[in-house]
Amino acid sequence: MDRRFFLAASLGSLALPALVRAQEVSQRTRWKVRASEGFDALAFLGPLAGRELYLKYYQNDAEAFAPRLSEPLRADIKALWQEAEDSGFGLLGPGLSVFFSGNDDSSMAALIESAAAPEARLLASYRGSDKWDEKDWRWFLGVAPRLKMIFEAMQGAGFAAFRAERIGDLDRRIVQLQSDLGAYDVIHWHEKLTGRTFDPEIEVVLLQFCKPHGISVQGQTFLQAADWNTPITVRVAAHEMLHPPVPMDGAAAIAALAVLARDPLIPRIVREHDPQWGYTTLEGLLNEDMAQALDQLISEALGVGRNPADRWRKADDGIHVLAGAIYGMLRDDHWIDTGGSIEDWLAAAVKAGRFAPPRLHAVAARVLERPIDALWPLPA
């Protein structure tokens, strides 16, 4: 499973004033903002598993709550997390959020009910979504009884009250963000730059424990930290709604992957980068990096973009060389002005030889402001 998680490390810089385009009040996009105890419980599995990626943000919280759970249960959370990575499922908490987004996610009790009867409560929605993966589902079914025991223990240890103590005045934050987002017509740009039709509603779920991730789940719903500001929320929405940017089993993607497989650099990035960032298959990296290239254009159009060279240097140890190259090609083609079918664009670019290593690397080097012979890894 190649999960697409936006990381906070890549979200924080300023907009590009020269690229800001005048925005009218949103005509296409309808925003819905809410919270979720259930998704927060899934997110908190990362800190409880002792993963460094999450303890950077939640070490004090983990140290306060973990002693309420038995030692065997804490050990099983750590074991499950490692098993998820080893099996190819990916990061446990974010990955589980995709499954449980198919049913009630409002409480620990709802998670327990779904884990007790996943085929009755979760399968139909998951199978009908664009996230469906039979291998992942089989793995999930095998661990569902263990998850139910973990959720029951967290419920018995008072997770709901523990979360409520830390989350502050979330209702006020929801109202404010809902109001602020009304100025950003993200769906208009999605449709223009992909040639596809999107549902006008984007649902944003604010969480206490999900840093550093922004997580795309079923439908046009994504999860993010409650204290991320409006520009970050817009950028996450611009990104997460794009997956997949083209059908990954379609002719255009297959042709691109065939060329990229012969590239001396891109497959090496897939093989050798730190697996905590995800994108451990070539298909997963193409999916992610096309989405990042498009979301960069959308963010710039909405006035919340970042300098692309800075963005892709700071994100995921600089692995998104392909994103920089695709973005550069789209800029060269004035895609923000013309728009159209991104799948047709990809097919034409591959056919014209623009994905051949010398041309691809040259565009990436220009955008990323790196030497063409030292695109990755970044210097220490």
Image (cartoon, rainbow, N blue to C red):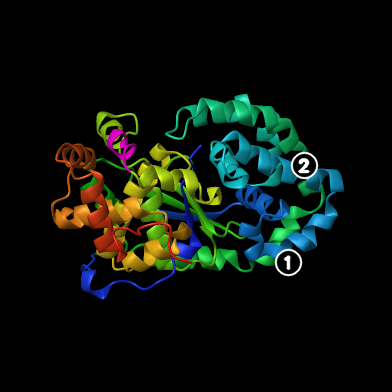
Tell me the tag on residue 60.
1
In this figure, which residue is indicated by the disc labeled 2? 76
Q: Using the image, determine if residue 351 lies above or below residue 326.
A: above
Could you classify mark 2 by the number of other residues whose Cα lies within 10 Å: few (under 14), some (14-19), or many (20 or more)? some
**SS assignment at label 1:** helix
Mark positioned earlier in the residue sequence (1 or 2): 1
**Magenta stretch in the rendered image:** 257-263
Queried whether the magenta region covers residue 146, the answer comes back as: no
The foreground one among 66 and 379 is 379
Q: Is residue 355 left or right of residue 257?
A: left
Picture residue at 68% right of the left edge, 33% below the top: 115
Q: Amino acid at mark 1?
A: Asn
Examine the structure image and report whether residue 262 is included in the region drawn in magenta.
yes
Q: Amino acid at mark 2?
A: Asp
Compared with residue 98, is residue 212 higher up or lower down, i.e. above or below?
A: below
**Residue 244 rendering spot, x and y as whole percentages:** 36, 40
Please tell me whether residue 28 is drawn above or below residue 9 in the rendered image.
Answer: above
Question: Would you identify the image quadrant in which residue 267 lies?
Answer: top left
211 left or right, relative to 358: right
Give how far across and how far down residue 126 sits, in percent: 51, 31
| Total labels drawn | 2
Spatial distance from mark 1 to mark 2, Cα to Cα? 21 Å
Q: x, y (%) of residue 74? A: 79, 48
